[in-house]
Image: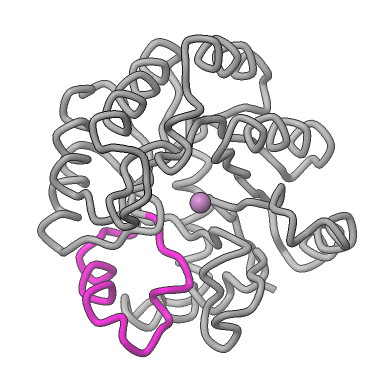
Amino acid sequence: MLKIFDSHAHYDDESFNEDREQVIKELKENGIVGVLNCGASFEGARTSVALADKYDIFYAAVGIHPENALEFNQNVLEELRDMAKNKRVRAIGEIGLDYYYEENPPREVQKSVFRAQMKLAEELNLPVVIHDRDAHEDTLNILKEFPKVKGVLHCFSGSVEFARECLKLGYNIGFTGVVTFKNAKKLVEVAKEVPLDRMLVETDCPYMAPTPFRGKRNRSDYINYIIEKIAKIKAVSEEEISKATINNTKLMLKL
Ligand code: NI
């Protein structure tokens, strides 16, 4: 059985309310050695910490997602700082920029919330989990303002050139089920480019389930299909991808 570290999940999502306990029990039986549960809202951050306190394979990232940038304020920043004192909190995230939806918070608000949380990560010496959707240039510019901070570009969706820039800054590249999709040509090129020691695998569950579960609720054991695809792209064994991605995630989270 392949061992898997899911570097980005949302088991706090309501789609797991009915059977969360059972799913997590099965994950442990199915070779999942670690899960980084990422907060996307203030409430999500709190729940991520609670999950990490409850389950030994779980760790937490705390942060405010760009879609929720309007809920960020000084008080929230202090609460996040306080949550990060918990030893199970290993990263700040997910944070970043999302210009995809028209109704998302104004770009200037997103950028200032992103910068404030990058600064927090720098102060606390924690890695960051970056969400970037249709905002590659602004994301890169802000990452460059914090050269001491490292982390992962989660659910990477940029070009090979953009991946090179992120690698140069010391960031890892996170691959979801999208890499298994038929139309994932650009992402396959990115996977060819990213060295084995800088790749992470992730679900972003409940979303982004790989083929053959595309459109269904995602879960960490489906990462098998992502590893299978990346192993083919890199022409190495699945065990090698499993080992490298576990190692890279542990290194990033200082585990
Ligand atoms: Ni996410």
* Outermost residue to the left: 161
Q: Position of residue 248 (x, y in %)?
A: 44, 47
Assess whether residue 93 is covered by the magenta stretch: no
Residue depicted at x 83% and y 65%: 26
In reply to whether residue 185 is colored magenta, the answer given is: yes
Q: Which quadrant is the C terminus positioned in?
A: top right
Q: Which picture quadrant has residue 235?
A: bottom left
Residue at position x 47%, y 56% from top? 245
Q: Which residue sits furthest front? A: 103
Q: Which residues are magenta?
A: 174-196
Q: Main secondary structure of the magenta part?
A: helix
Residue 156 horizontal/vertical position (percent): 33, 58
**How many marks can you see?**
0
Dividing the image into 4 quarters, which one contains the N terminus? bottom right
Above or below residue 204? Residue 114 is: above
Horizontal side of residue 154 vs 49, given as left or right = left
Residue drawn at x 19%, y 50% as measured from the top left: 136
Q: Nearer the viewer, residue 16 or 129?
A: 16
- Judging from the image, the colouring scheme is one colour
Q: Out of 136 and 90, give the one closest to the viewer.
A: 136
In the image, residue 236 above or below residue 15: below
The answer to whether 74 appears left or right of 167 in the picture is right
Comparing 98 with 119, the one in front is: 98
Q: Position of residue 201 (x, y in %)?
A: 48, 60
The spot of residue 92 in percent (x, y) is 48, 29
